[in-house]
Amino acid sequence: MSPACSPLILATERGRAWGEDHFRHLFAELRKLAELPRDFQYRDLRRSAVIRLARAGCTIPEIVSITGHSLKTVHTILSTYMPPDSTVARNAIRKLDRAARRRLAPA
């Protein structure tokens, strides 16, 4: 497996990576069957994954390793599609609390 390939990316029945054109075609068929809006693109799934991973507390490098985006692209997606919210704030406060407890814990 190449270093740029995530082990979570689905492969064809022959174990090869999906070609973009083939995936786009299949996604269009599924979109139609699911009666999703025509402007809903397969890229929206990947962008949504970035947001969900961030809300779950993943770091940008962790998100990059899963989605295959570049650091810059993940930052752009987060800046565009993820306004600060209470879930993200709670995650950050938990991390801060854990760090403070570790500093105060006796050695």
Image (tube, rainbow, N blue to C red):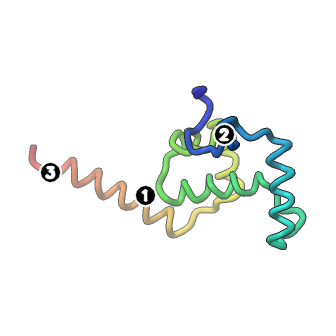
| Residue indicated by mark 2 | 69
Q: Badge 1: how crowded within 10 Å, few (<14), some, or many (20+)?
A: few
Q: Is residue 66 left or right of residue 102?
A: right
Badge 3 vs badge 1, beta-carbon distance below 8 Å: no
Q: Is residue 93 left or right of residue 72?
A: left
Q: CA distance from mark 3 to mark 2?
A: 38 Å
Q: CA distance from mark 3 to mark 1?
A: 20 Å
Of all residues shown, which one is farthest toward the front?
14
> Reading the chain from its start, which is encountered first: label 3 or label 1?
1
Total labels: the figure holds 3
Task: Name the residue type under label 1.
Answer: Ala
The answer to which image quadrant residue 84 occupies is bottom right
Q: Is residue 73 left or right of residue 40?
A: left
Q: At 62% across and 44% down in the image, what residue appears?
A: 9
Q: At 29% across and 55% down in the image, what residue appears?
A: 98
| Residue indicated by mark 1 | 92
Q: Percent position (x, y) of residue 90?
A: 43, 65
Q: Quadrant of the N terminus?
A: top right
Q: Badge 2: how crowded within 10 Å, few (<14), some, or many (20+)?
A: some
SS assignment at label 2: loop
Q: Percent position (x, y) of residue 27?
A: 81, 56
> Could you say which is closer to the camera, residue 64 or residue 34?
34
Task: Name the residue type under label 2.
Answer: His
**Above or below: residue 102 compared with residue 14:** below
Q: Badge 3: how crowded within 10 Å, few (<14), some, or many (20+)?
A: few
| Residue indicated by mark 3 | 105
Of all residues shown, which one is farthest toward the left?
106
Q: CA distance from mark 1 to mark 2?
A: 23 Å
> Reading the chain from its start, which is encountered first: label 1 or label 2?
2
